[in-house]
Image (spheres, rainbow, N blue to C red):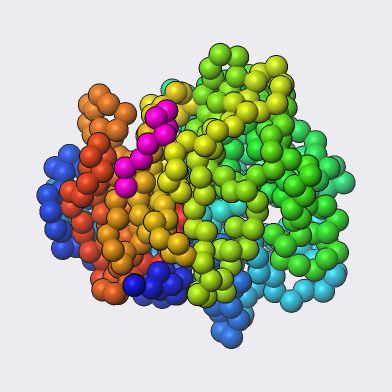
Amino acid sequence: MSDYRRGFESLRQELHEPSLPVEGEWPDWLEGTLIRNGPAQFEVGDEDYNHWFDGHAMLHAFRMRDGTVSYRNRFVRSQSRTEALEQGRIARSEFATDPCMSLFGRVMSVFNPNPTDNASINVARLDDQYVALTATPLPVAFDPETLETAGVVEYDDDVDVDMSTPHPQVEPGTGRMLFHTLSFGRQCQYGVYGTEAEGKTRRPVATLDVDRPSYMHSFGMSERYVILSEWPLVVNPTDLLLRGRPFIENFEWQPERGTRFRVLRKADGAEVATCEAEAAFGFHHVNAFERDGAVVCDVVTYPDASVVEELSLDRLRSDAPSRGSGHLRRYRLPLDGGAAASTLRGEERIELPRIHDGPATGRPYQYVYGVGTRAAGQFTDQLVKTDVPAGTAQTWHEEGTYPGEPVFVAAPDGAREDEGVVLSVVLDPDAQQSFLLVLDAPSFTERARAAVPHPIPFGFHGQFFD
């Protein structure tokens, strides 16, 4: 059996391949650029990062023009990376790695923020700039052609927050981009802010005071509402100062709290419902829509937060089985504030979920695409297409290969929700390379692939820009 652990080895090579070898029939309408983001260097000098989420960010661009596929990759030249390379050691605190720091240093790092700008999670278009995103409010701009780093984007406002989701939601029709944020202090606060399609001014949509903030990686959005999922993985903000631990290790799993869904009206920021559910944990919201006096909210969930520790590099590189994916769960959130009801949608494990962004966003929809796990102990060894209302699934699997997040690209003038292709970067450890896979979305079968001359470490998220 091939070893998926190759996907957690560092890649230091940066290259530009103007024409990749293509197998199969490339769709003649498929033109644009897939830009993906993820960690690619997991050690500096003699020091190792602790977690998959900590590695230095690298961008990978697949440009498709006139039947030719080119490839380029470059590290994000963040201050976090620059300082680490100059000092020969880990220089800034990351998600689960904290350089040695005195109590005074920890206090100063919170009250005079010098947070990481290691933007390794996602990419987006913000006004007229392309940006790499992480969980701090420091989007890093880059050139979409060369992938050269242009520096941290300066917003045109005085909003002061400590965390900002790397999964913004874009409203269909308006193009407004919404973020959820978290501010630490004597009174912690969740926030939701929006930037118009043109501009870099964050305007408040809603705020909520909170005593023990929950770790929330993403949020849901329907046509009229924003949904915050308060998983019972929570932090006492004082612990961030005094315990001397990496950021995520200050959060505690308290299942007795259950899960709370906070439903906020976008028009005026009012909290219209708080819905209680059983204890669970999730990284990724899939979609949300309104129906019959309730918000239907689909999320990939786990029974608890132990998956966070399971994604540590020591665990991922060991022989211990890995839970690389969760299950798709549908929550019904009554707008009168009653208890949430939930059901599983399909039997296949799934993670890194994607939908037909735009037409399906915030509306009733049919399909979600993701990575899944076929064999026990393996790491995301198949792609999954789930028919959400039916709870059925189609899968793509190739023995000895490990696919990454699937990105749906709609065919021009497509009438059906799944009319188009699905793109995924797949690791082939035995061949010591990766390839860009093109699946026909309706049949979920291969149409083409383009091989890259090096293995690409497992990444997180990407976007297709036409």
Residue 142's spot in the image, x, y percent? 44, 55
Q: Residue at x 51, y 64 (%)?
A: 322
Residue situated in front as seen by the camera: 427 or 166:
427
Chain part drawn in magenta: 388-395
Q: Is residue 70 above or below residue 256?
A: below
Q: Quadrant of the N terminus?
A: bottom left
Residue situated in front as seen by the camera: 466 or 226:
226
Q: Residue at x 77, y 74 (%)?
A: 101
Q: Is residue 213 above or below residue 75?
A: above
186 magenta-colored:
no
Residue 309's spot in the image, x, y percent? 63, 63
Residue 273's spot in the image, x, y percent? 71, 23
Q: Residue at x 20, y 56 (%)?
A: 449
Residue situated in front as seen by the camera: 434 or 274:
274
Res 377 seen here? yes
Q: Is residue 265 above or below residue 464?
A: above
Relative horizontal placement of residue 464, taking residue 431 as reference (left or right): right
Q: Residue at x 37, y 59 (%)?
A: 381
390 magenta-colored:
yes
Task: Choose top left, top right, bottom left or bottom right for residue 13.
Answer: bottom left
Res 161 seen here? no
Task: Choose top left, top right, bottom left or bottom right for residue 404.
Answer: bottom left
Relative horizontal placement of residue 380, taking residue 304 as reference (left or right): left
Q: Residue extending furthest bottom?
A: 46
